[in-house]
Image (spheres, helix red, strand yellow):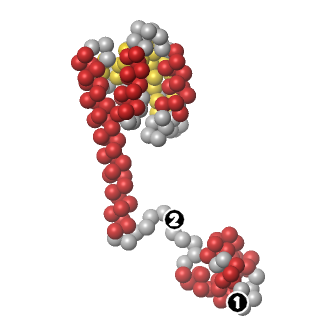
Amino acid sequence: MIIGYARVSTDDQSTAAQVDALDRRGCEPIYKESKSGGKAGRWDRPVLHKAIDRLQEGDTFVVWKLDRLGRSVKGLVDLVAEFETRQVHFRSLTDGIDTKTPAGRFFFHVMASLAQMERELIVERTRAGPNAARKIGRTGGRPRRMTPGKVESAEQLLAAGMPPRDVVRNLGVSVPTLYRWLPSSSRS
């Protein structure tokens, strides 16, 4: 049996292109899943678990691309080692990997390493942007509702006896925001 597995990271993405490619390669059945592969281990993906449980000796497990199966080299290598133990073949269509051959097994290890390196580079670049912004004084995120001027105004209004509900209405903030910035010990 040739079992296909298609995965997208979010619900607003489509597995259609992957399913079409798997279908053309004769995969039946094709398991479809919408779950991130970045942080989730393979057992956090129930459809993948179900597909793997169905595999029997001599079957072939097919994915459209290696990163649809997993992100870490260790996870991919462990999974393919499990396939080898169970005498199940693995094929990745766009990466040209087929573990039926020694060259395919070697190529799998090379591609798994490259896939992990690519993922780590993406994470590195993603972190570089905010780090560079912090160096020039930008903090990111939503602007604070309570500016230093509003904190000072709130302290003065509360000291003058204005009720907190009137203070927050006047400043355009919520009561929890006011209390977060002016704990009860500073309001007396």
Q: Nearer the viewer, residue 21 or 116?
A: 116
Could you say where residue 87 lies in the image, as x and y percent from the top left?
Answer: 40, 12
Which quarter of the image is occupied by the N terminus?
top left
Could you say where residue 151 lies in the image, as x and y percent from the top left?
Answer: 60, 81
Residue drawn 31% across the image and 40% down it: 118
Q: Provide the residue designation for mark 2.
A: 142
Q: Provide the residue designation for mark 1.
A: 159
Q: Amino acid at mark 2?
A: Arg
Could you say where residue 167 lies in the image, as x and y percent from the top left?
Answer: 70, 80
In the image: residue 139, left or right of residue 184: left
Q: Nearer the viewer, mark 1 or mark 2?
A: 1
| Residue 96 vertical placement versus 128 (above, below) | above
Could you say where residue 52 lies in the image, as x and y percent from the top left?
Answer: 49, 20
Q: Amino acid at mark 1?
A: Ala
**Residue 67 location, quadrant:** top left
**Residue 159 location, quadrant:** bottom right
Mark 1 → mark 2, Cα distance in angstroms:
29 Å
Q: Residues within 10 Å of mark 2 (few under 14, many from 20)?
A: few
